[in-house]
Image (cartoon, rainbow, N blue to C red):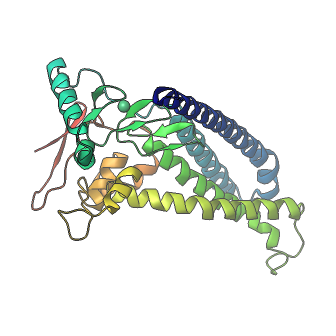
Amino acid sequence: MNQKKQQEKLIFFDKAAFLLFKLFSLVLVLISFILIVVIIYFYFTFMLPMTASENIIIFTIQTTSAIWIIWGISYNYVKAVFTKPGYPPPNLITKEELKQLKKRYKLIKSNPHNSRALKKIPYCPICKNFKPERTHHDALSGKCVLRMDHFCPWINNTVGYKNHKFFILFMVYLILGCIYAAILSSSAFFFDIGLSDHPVDHQGPLIFVFITCLVVIIGVSFLVGFHFYLLLTNQTTIEFYQNQLPNPKSKKGKIRKFDLGKRKNFDQFFGTTNQYWFKFLFNFENPKGDGIHFIKAEKNLNYRYLNIGDSNVII
Ligand SMILES: [Zn+2]
């Protein structure tokens, strides 16, 4: 078998594996949607009547916070699934510039010892286009994705510049929802620990809800914790692994190019302002900026932000 046929066979298997993975992801998304609907139904028909407080003020807090959390989970999940991660727009550079870039790429590629230098060329040989900083080619969608993080099968979408925020907010609301449900279902243990005079009805299902919530809280907290670490240090998952590699410019081996400090990184990611950081839970807007230009961290440089149109400008 010649080399060309072998290559074609490999491409075929790659495409088949990608297709299977995409189908699997689609099933996961359908399961997630069904689960969300079932949980909402379950809450209003079973949990709420069982655990509703007789005090009107507590009951109002109980129901409004439930509606707010349900809204946060549903809205952010839909946005994470259906918002495209962001692709580089065409004509970012002129045709002549692209031609020169392609030439440079081919020249560096011709030397097998230049693999490190090749990665620095802002050119995607698959899309045959200019690749802005922090952009990576996503094999599953076959496109370059702005500020790409990873492909998530639970949303059947690539997490990138435009949907990363919704992806994180979905997980945060999911944890809040589980904490809420765990508190409500903890009434199942009240009789056993002497907090109530009579055993609660449907103790079994309530214990099941309580344990399920604990498992979800522990599992998702690890992922949320990691993503908060990434956003507070202004890195994507891909950049995090790249930053672990030894770097000749730094003894520590880590240079976080875009790390402007925790507070500024947080505000940049969630679109909040200094003193109102907690508003990140209520900010459902699309991220500001264009996903192409990012402020770089430089020592002894005092940055201030000014949003002009779609891009962050340093003044
Ligand atoms: Zn590409």
Comparing 131 with 296, the one in front is 131
Residue 157 is left or right of residue 100, and the answer is right
Q: Quadrant of residue 217?
A: bottom right
Comparing 90 with 97, the one in front is 97
Residue drawn at the location 33% of the way across and 39% of the way down: 135
Residue drawn at the location 55% of the way across and 30% of the way down: 9
Q: Quadrant of residue 276?
A: bottom left
State the residue lying farthest toward the front.
Answer: 1
Relative to 281, say whether 180 is above or below: below
Q: How many marks?
A: 0
Residue drawn at the location 90% of the way across and 72% of the way down: 198
Q: In which quarter of the image is residue 265?
A: bottom left
Comparing 285 with 18, the one in front is 18
Residue 256 is left or right of residue 198, and the answer is left
In what quadrant of the picture does the N terminus appear?
Answer: top right
Comparing 199 with 268, the one in front is 268
Question: How far across and how far down the image is residue 32, in percent?
Answer: 67, 41
State the residue lying farthest toward the top.
Answer: 95
In what quadrant of the picture does the C terminus appear?
Answer: top left
Relative to 75, say whether 188 is above or below: below
Residue drawn at the location 35% of the way across and 48% of the way down: 269
Residue 36 visible: yes
Regarding ligand 1, which quadrant of the image does it lie in?
top left
Question: How far across and how far down the image is residue 152, in percent?
Answer: 54, 43
State the residue lying farthest toward the bottom.
Answer: 194
Question: How far across and how far down the image is residue 214, in percent?
Answer: 68, 64
Question: How far across and how far down the image is residue 111, in percent?
Answer: 23, 41
Relative to 192, say whether 59 is above or below: above
Residue 63 is left or right of residue 152, and the answer is right
Residue 131 visible: no
